[in-house]
């Protein structure tokens, strides 16, 4: 996929993994964990999130612990893209490993507001606010991370490779 349009779900700077997936509920099954996503800052998030929504945030998104649930819950909620000014290294790695597309773009948090429509072009590295017609750029993923994301994550890619080799 090279281009899509989604609804922006906006967050600020330093959105940590404890805000995304609070540590007090990590023992719950994913179906319950999803109900508490972003609960400390956006209690109604679970009720309002839709398949295809796009997270847009400020600096240091996904900082804190390396808990994979903070990325896995995004995928379960139908989020495919995390767009931010900057992202914690481990969160970035977890996004790719689980099949989410991480995008870092300086100034992006000034271009989008909650509820705006965002057009993402992964070939051109372009983000457009469909409502205001404002643009910002990003560096698309290189070949291997793109293959992992396209396959839905590293485990799906490895399964596809082994299935192909066993034919």
Image: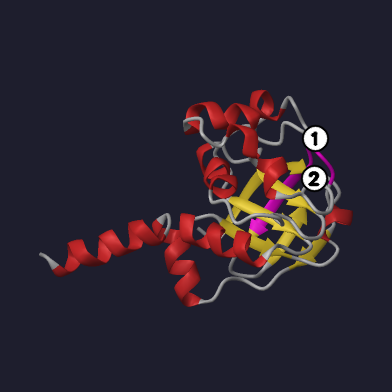
Q: Is residue 42 magenta?
A: no
For the residue pair 67 and 157, the one nearer the viewer reads as: 67
Q: Identify the residue shown where x is 84% and y is 53%.
A: 13
Give the secondary structure at mark 2. loop
Residue extending furthest toward the right = 110
Disc 1 crowd, CA 10 A, few/some/many (<14, 14-19, 20+)? few
Residue contact at pointers 1 and 2, CB within 8 angstroms:
yes
**Residue 46 x %, y %:** 65, 28
Q: Choose the circle earlier in sequence order: 1 or 2.
A: 2
For the residue pair 85 and 27, the one nearer the viewer reads as: 27
Can residue 7 be seen here?
no
Residue pointed to by mark 1: 41
Q: Quadrant of residue 156?
A: bottom left
Q: Identify the residue shown where x is 70% and y is 47%.
A: 55
The segment highlighted magenta reads: 113-120
**Residue 54 x %, y %:** 67, 46
**Residue 24 x %, y %:** 63, 34
For the residue pair 72 and 136, the one nearer the viewer reads as: 72
Q: Above or below — where is 28 with respect to 74?
A: above
Residue pointed to by mark 2: 11
Q: What colour scheme governs how the chains and residues are painted in the rendered image of this protein? A: secondary structure
Q: Is residue 159 left or right of residue 51?
A: left
Q: Quadrant of residue 137?
A: bottom right
**Residue 16 x %, y %:** 73, 50
Q: Identify the residue shown where x is 63% and y is 39%.
A: 23
Q: Quadrant of the C terminus?
A: bottom left
Q: Identify the residue shown where x is 54% and y is 59%.
A: 94
Q: Quadrant of residue 69?
A: top right
């Amino acid at each position: 996929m090279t281009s899509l349009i989604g609804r922006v779900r906006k967050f600020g700077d330093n959105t940590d993994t404890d805000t995304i997936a609070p540590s007090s509920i990590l023992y719950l099954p994913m179906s319950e964990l999803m109900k508490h996503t972003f609960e400390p800052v956006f209690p109604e998030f679970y009720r309002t999130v839709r398949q295809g929504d796009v997270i847009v945030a400020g600096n240091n998104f996904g900082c804190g612990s390396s808990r994979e649930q903070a990325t896995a819950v995004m995928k379960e909620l139908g989020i495919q893209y995390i767009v931010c000014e900057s992202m914690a290294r481990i969160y970035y790695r977890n996004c790719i490993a689980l099949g989410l597309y991480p995008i870092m773009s300086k100034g992006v948090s000034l271009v989008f507001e909650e509820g705006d429509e965002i057009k993402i072009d992964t070939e051109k590295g372009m983000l457009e606010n469909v409502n205001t017609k404002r643009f910002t750029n990003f560096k698309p993923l290189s070949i291997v991370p793109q293959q992992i994301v396209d396959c839905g994550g590293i485990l799906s890619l490895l399964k596809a490779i082994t299935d192909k080799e066993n034919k």
